[in-house]
Image (cartoon, rainbow, N blue to C red):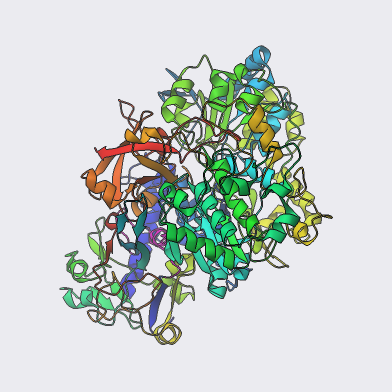
Amino acid sequence: MLKHPAFHIDVGTCTGCKTCMIACKDKNDLADGVKWRRVSEYAGGGWVKRTDGTVTQDVFAYYISVSCNHCEDPICVSVCPTTAMHKDESGIVLVDTTKCIGCHYCEWACPYRAPQYNAAAGVMSKCNFCIDYQREGKPPACVAACPTRSLTFGEYDDLKKRFGESALMAPLPDPSITKPNLFVTPGRTAKPMGSGNGSISNPEEV
Amino acid sequence: MQNSQISQLNEVSRRTALKLCATLGGLAVLGSGSGILRAAAASPGAGSAAERIVTTSCHVNCGSRCVLRAHVANDIITRIETDDSGTDEYGMHQVRACLRGRSMRKRVYAPERLKYPMIRVGKRGEANFKRVSWDEALDAIAAKMKDIKQRFGSEAFYLNYCTGNLGGMVSKSWPPAQTPVARLMNCWGGYLNHYGTYSTAQISGTMPYVYGANLGNAISDIVNSKLVVMFGNNPASTRMSGGGIIHDLLVARGKSGVRLVVVDPTYTDTAAVADEWIPIRPGTDAAFCAAIAHVLIAEGMVDQKFLDTYCVGFDEAHMPAGIPANSSYQAYVLGQGPDGLVKTPAWASPICGIPVETIVRLARQIGQSKPCCISQGWGVQRHANGEDACRAIATLAALTGNVGIAGGNTGAREGAFTIPFTLFPTLTNPVKDSISVFMWTDAITRGTDMTALRDGVRGRDQLKAPIKFIWNYAGNALINQHSDINRTAEILRDDSKCEMIVVHENFMTPSARFADILLPGTINLEENDFTVSEAASEMAYAIFEQKVIEPLFESRDIYTVCADVAKRLGVGEQFTEGRTREQWLQYLLDQSRPGLPDLPATLEEAWKLGVLKVKNPGPPYVAFKTFRDDPVANPLATPSGKIEIFSKKLWDIGHSWELPAGERIPAVPEFTEEPEGYLSPLRSKFPLQLVTFHYKQRTHSTYGNVPWLKEVAPQELWINPIDADTRSIRHGDPVRVFNDRGTSVIAAKVTPRVMPGVVLLPEGAWYAPDGAGHDHAGSANMLTSQHPSPLTKGNPQHSSLVEVARA
């Protein structure tokens, strides 16, 4: 079991295949509509139709896969009225389902929309970093699934050494809000955080 | 922490109960009084204690075969994992399944599973069936087969194109000649063949005229390239396996950082990780290539020495005898041929929609980057003029001398490292008559009128019989994946034409609805079988798939079904040779072992091993390398032994075949206009070019009923904001996509990722008609045409004009 686990995503090689989403749904048997991991498509740029019958464009699109980032400053924990949402000794943010009253505060507060409601159980649910797999020495389901090897995990300090400071890129929120344990390597077309150049173009999928 | 663990245990028992209910056909209801639920809930953890992990695979028609590790408890699949073996070092890397394979248990336990044999009641296509016993169903099939054979002969039997289970060795649905159904028919007089595929009809039928074969370098070989230009090639969508081409591409590019340019009407998922995207209007690639060739010629960048040594037909000095002057490709490009048009970038630019400066810049990059990998996917050729487009791209590779060398390519799709494996023997078909895979609906309606020169009939000048009996095992091309669904449905509804359709299938698919006899088939997780890798560059592998669960309901595998029909036809012993399915698997292992000494000795050892991986011992595959090294000693399988930029064979075909007005088969890769293309007058009525694409939700139509996949990748019509604005369409709006052939209703995805004037529908959504015959699933073949391409008589799926309006 890692002391301080964190995720890394290489946006430059992620093709948006969403295998991480399905591996997560299968492993955790998630209900319809519940997505502990989400792949956002961020796209933008424009087209010009020229009078000579040709077109020019500066279109871009890239994908970013995000689950719970098990933040250092988890706003979901601080807004939870029952202390159900808590951080364990490894820093993994978990829901104590015996305490959770399903009030959704965590869901509304989280800038990554990580906590999601389990309607059948009447409680909130979220990524637990596959803590059971990690205890067996196995990687989380989403990481083990990634066909392009764009999604990895490891000790926070090791990832920081390998990948440096995380990119501040759109459409991710300002990391100072929650201090996520997430490292992001941008691709060629990455836009800066808060960029108005593009938008999440698959809201129906995340 | 303890609470989390408890929560996890509860989750396991709930899941087990849900699976049991699903197994019972989705009919059992979770709730009070359910003995099954109580039994599972009473002993939480009992299921997990008994859990075992079985190696199996997903081997549908995506070009890849992926490892699945199924967790099973109490004969119920509880979880699907993938290859996690070893260190994942490239060359012996993990064969990680894509999202579809990972959703497999939702497919196995889908409520659409067919449960027992059924016979049609009422009209064909209405999907009214009555349950019968297996004996009743098989007796009815055998009786009708005898009747039709007596009246029409063996030539009236057709094995429809079916690719739902193409990766298995025994339960194989494609190619038709390698299936148990073919073995059955070959024991009993044979069947009408087909040639070509819906995937590759034009390119696989055309490249042999150029190179004598349809081959390309391994994608891993781009590690040796200075530039990679991909025309309509999108491995991020078409080769998604983590053991296959997209992984090979990303690893090679990660090593060399080679510049990757994607030419495509769409900003594809491959373009998303490329260096440059050049949007091009669909169906105009040959014009684009001619303009690039013009720049290469004008600026002295053609490899003249290569052309003189290895090619015929580039210039007038290297032409076959007896051909009029100015018939070479150079004469075509320079405007010296019959059309008199100089194919400058300024000529091509308004056709392709690409600015002159972009054409000139790419031409110079190609001409100055040695070696350069020029490749194409199969979208370019799936057009009414696709035969000329795919040859034009190959010609660029020849003009620049990139054929037969490391880092170069032929202009075709990538090759792969494979291992030899003996196929299930299907004997020989005594019938030699063959039709294009795309012409079977015509062979139903006007079979005996179809000729070699007019309709591409092979093996006979004119068909002897119309199609009267169709076997459709594990396929959805009976309705969904064939063009022009409305026309197909009309032809099939008339059961005086094709008199019997047997469908052997897992689900109530759109095709299954048109069955006369509908047989429930096992899914591959309910069968013992093997599968062998296909589209993977540097590592080949075999997956030994042990049966994970017993077959659900009354489903049976195709070997058993064919053996039981064979018995009824009096050829049972010939069919089985006294072997069970498992004995045939052992036979295949034994037959394959001389070529693959590491193969396990017994099935038990095979199941234990799970996967056998073999690393390519040599460098990445280079197509036609021996020809390049010594063209005299190793000529190509073309008439001249060289690369034929001008094909005398095509010249003769173009001057002898009977073609509809306006169609041509040129001897050099000219830009020919499509009946429904950008330059077509029909665009005044239907202004948008519809292109279909391979979508992550499905492999063609397989997995099209899995809710998880629909949730993360819903079916949508992709439309550019400019085209959406003029039609007052917003993202998410339901829209009608229509032309004279049909109407489909689906939500709009307004995105800059598709060029103006083009709309995209992912192919394969399950046709869902309303009472008025309008589809409500976004099924692309509501809109496509059954008019075949001139040379290969292939399917023009990307040559459809449509209009779109808010629904």
The part of the chain drawn in magenta is A12-36
Q: Residue at x 61, y 40 (%)?
A: B174
Percent position (x, y) of residue A161? 44, 87
State the count of labels: 0
Q: Is residue B409 magenta?
A: no
Q: Split into 4 quadrants, where in the image is the N terminus of chain A?
A: bottom left
Q: Residue at x 39, y 80 (%)?
A: A5
Instruction: Judge by depth and name the residue closer to the eye, B179 or B792.
Output: B792
> Is residue B46 placed above or below B30 in the rendered structure?
below
Residue B614, visible in the rendered structure: yes
Percent position (x, y) of residue B540? 66, 60
Left or right of residue B627: residue B315: left
Q: Split into 4 quadrants, where in the image is the C terminus of chain A?
A: bottom left
Left or right of residue B459: residue B274: left
> Is residue B91 placed above or below B455 in the rendered structure?
below
Percent position (x, y) of residue B594? 81, 55
Q: Residue furthest top?
A: B151
Q: Is residue A15 magenta?
A: yes
Q: Quadrant of residue B704?
A: top left
Left or right of residue A42: residue B631: right
Percent position (x, y) of residue B8? 36, 65
> Is residue A66 placed above or below B18 in the rendered structure?
below
Q: Residue at x 27, y 50 (%)?
A: B722
Predominant SS of the magenta segment: loop
Residue B729, visible in the rendered structure: no
Q: Quadrant of residue B302?
A: bottom right
